[in-house]
Image: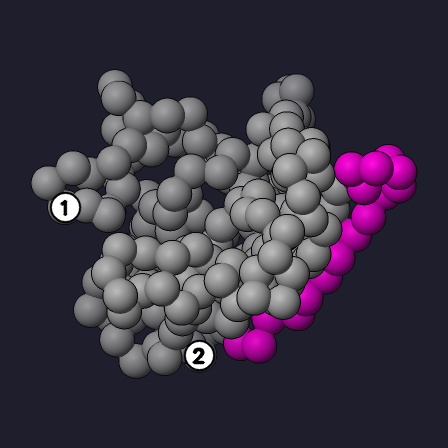
Amino acid sequence: MLVLDKPAGLLSVPGRGADKQDCLSARVQAQYPDALVVHRLDMATSGLLLMARGLSAQQQLSLAFAGRRVHKHYTAVVQGLMTEPPCTPDAADALPGWGLIDLPIAADWPRRPLRIIDQALGKPSQTRWRIESRDSQAGTTRLLLEALTGRSHQLRVHLQALGHPILGDALYGGQSNAPARRLHLHACALAFAHPVTGASLQFTSPASF
């Protein structure tokens, strides 16, 4: 397998059209022809991305993702000064200091590729969040996020639903995000079991913002 650090602005996989063929997977496969995609990051998101070496490894790692045995953490900077999540000691999956966004996400078909919160048609989607720091002068909050599910645009849609869109989000942030040069979302950590040996692996990449 390969653990890669994708820059912001680069596609994970090819898109439609000749101008969208340059992507991380194509660059990697030029050097490692047996490299296969396991998961993706949005084009605007930077950070850690995992590719498998061969079909067997791809199948095992895909099963690990589906079974929520791959733990993905992200750093984000959002608009506004967030307050600490409410304490829910009775919840079975509650973690001290962490909040849980549990809102179903569906495609916004008239405005594709946008996604929306849809209680009737949306797929179950869960994101844990924890405050890392606040910048009262800038009016922003730095968060650590854990994606428990892997829906398209999940973190961006969930934080918009809380009223704190990610800084620099051209799709979900509104015009107030215009001064930011990029989406402030970075996949900062991956933890999972090696598909062959079962050894516990952890990878980290600090955000540049």
Name the front one of labels 2 and 1: 1
Q: Which residue is mark 2?
A: 137
Mark yes or no: residue 118 visible.
Answer: yes
Residue at 65% across, 61% down: 32
- Point out residue 182 in the picture as x, y percentages from the top left corner: 39, 74
In the image, taking residue 3 as reference, residue 167 lies left or right, namely left
- Point out residue 170 in the picture as x, y percentages from the top left corner: 27, 65
Which picture quadrant has residue 55? top right
| Along the viewing direction, whichever of 118 and 16 lies nearer the viewer | 16
Magenta-tinted stretch? 193-209
Q: Amino acid at mark 1?
A: Arg
Residue at 28% across, 32% down: 106
Q: Residues within 10 Å of mark 2 (few under 14, many from 20)?
A: few
Q: Amino acid at mark 2?
A: Gln
Q: Which mark is residue 111?
A: 1
| Along the viewing direction, whichever of 106 and 3 lies nearer the viewer | 3
Q: Residues within 10 Å of mark 1 (few under 14, many from 20)?
A: few
Q: Main secondary structure of the magenta part?
A: loop
Query: Magenta segment: does it hold 85?
Result: no
Separation of marks 2 and 1 at Cα, in angstroms: 35 Å
